[in-house]
Image: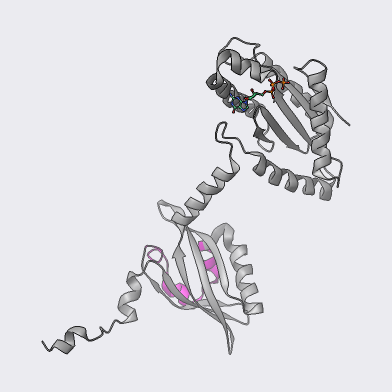
Amino acid sequence: MPVNDIDAPQRISADHLIPHIPGVIFQLHRARNGHMRFPYIEGGGVALKHIDRDLLAQNAGELVEQLTGNDHPKIMSAIERSARWMLPLTTRFLLPFPKEKPHWIAVSARPKTVVDGVQWNGIMMDINDQVSEEQRLRKLCDTDPLTELPNRRKLMVHLTNIASLSTRHGTPLSIMMIDIDHFKRLNDRWGHLHGDDVLKQLATQAQSLLRCEDMIARLGGEEFMVVLPLTSLQHCHTLADRIRHAISVYDFGMGAGQVTLSIGIAEFRCGEPLTSLIERADQALYNAKDIGRDCVCLLR
Ligand SMILES: Nc1nc2c(ncn2[C@@H]2O[C@H](COP(=O)(O)OP(=O)(O)OP(=O)(O)O)[C@@H](O)[C@H]2O)c(=O)[nH]1
């Protein structure tokens, strides 16, 4: 073999290469009347195995709707925005797989105006591992590691959203500030590890007494907050007293009656800053401590 042949650049054809790449290369065409088709879609991995490519090549609309499920409106508005402003198309969706959990797929494509509509050339990648890692990290950021309840950060985001819904619809919203009484004494007497166990059990017990739309979070130390959408102050008072009583008779492993709670409650006034609402609940909690603990106080 001549020496030159060894160093000669290999001719690699895209047709041979593309079936082996971990993704899909595609061309999407959308006509002015909205008709969509994929004149080209090729790639490796398992994503294309269960998909009718002939149908995609002729009339993709219905199949895209099936394949993107709940993400369909999001995909269609991303396509629309990309077509209207000639911006890159970047989005992600959950692709169902037979006998498997759905996989997250990322789409990235460039639009181009063609005579009868818009054409995108782009790639799709399976990003399931990255999304799982993102979800794991987000959970870590939002969760109190001891009790596994949402933490202060997550609660404040939630409270902001719920308060804005309450302002928009004029619906009631209340919060509870919960603090364990004489927790220092409990730690000193039974040990810090037992104190930790009390915090964990308290989280479970309180959660079991709340509705699934309520959120209880650990703010730090022995302090918790509950956000109760669609709940008036009066109803919140009843619930708070139910939690207070349940904990006061619960046996945390030291005999019943060893752990009690002071609870301050307040109701959101439409449009007020959240700091005012929290200050009122905090003040009500101080009042509960002041009048002897193991009770619920409210501030109107
Ligand atoms: N075991 C345990 N103790 C904690 C944790 N975080 C805070 N604490 C303890 O909680 C105690 C809180 O004490 P204080 O703020 O004096 O309140 P208290 O003893 O509950 O008294 P009152 O609130 O006035 O009824 C401190 O001793 C902290 O060390 C935790 O994660 N685990």
**Which image quadrant for residue 125?**
bottom left
Please give left or right for residue 86 compared with residue 263 in the image. left
User: What residue lies at 58% left-to-right and 60% top-to-bottom?
Assistant: 71
Farthest-out residue, left: 1
In the rendered structure, does residue 152 fall within the stretch colored magenta? no
User: What residue lies at 83% left-to-right and 48% top-to-bottom?
Assistant: 167
In the rendered structure, does residue 64 fall within the stretch colored magenta? yes
Residue 140's place in the image compared with 186, above or below, is below
| Screen quadrant of the N terminus | bottom left
Q: Residue 246 appears at what percent x and percent y?
A: 68, 18
**Which image quadrant for residue 74?**
bottom right
Q: Residue 269 appears at what percent x and percent y?
A: 87, 41
Please give left or right for residue 126 compared with residue 32 in the image. left
Residue 205's place in the image compared with 217, above or below, is above
Please give left or right for residue 35 compared with residue 122 in the image. right
Q: Which residues are magenta?
A: 46-67
- Say whether residue 288 is visible: yes
Picture quadrant of ligand 1? top right
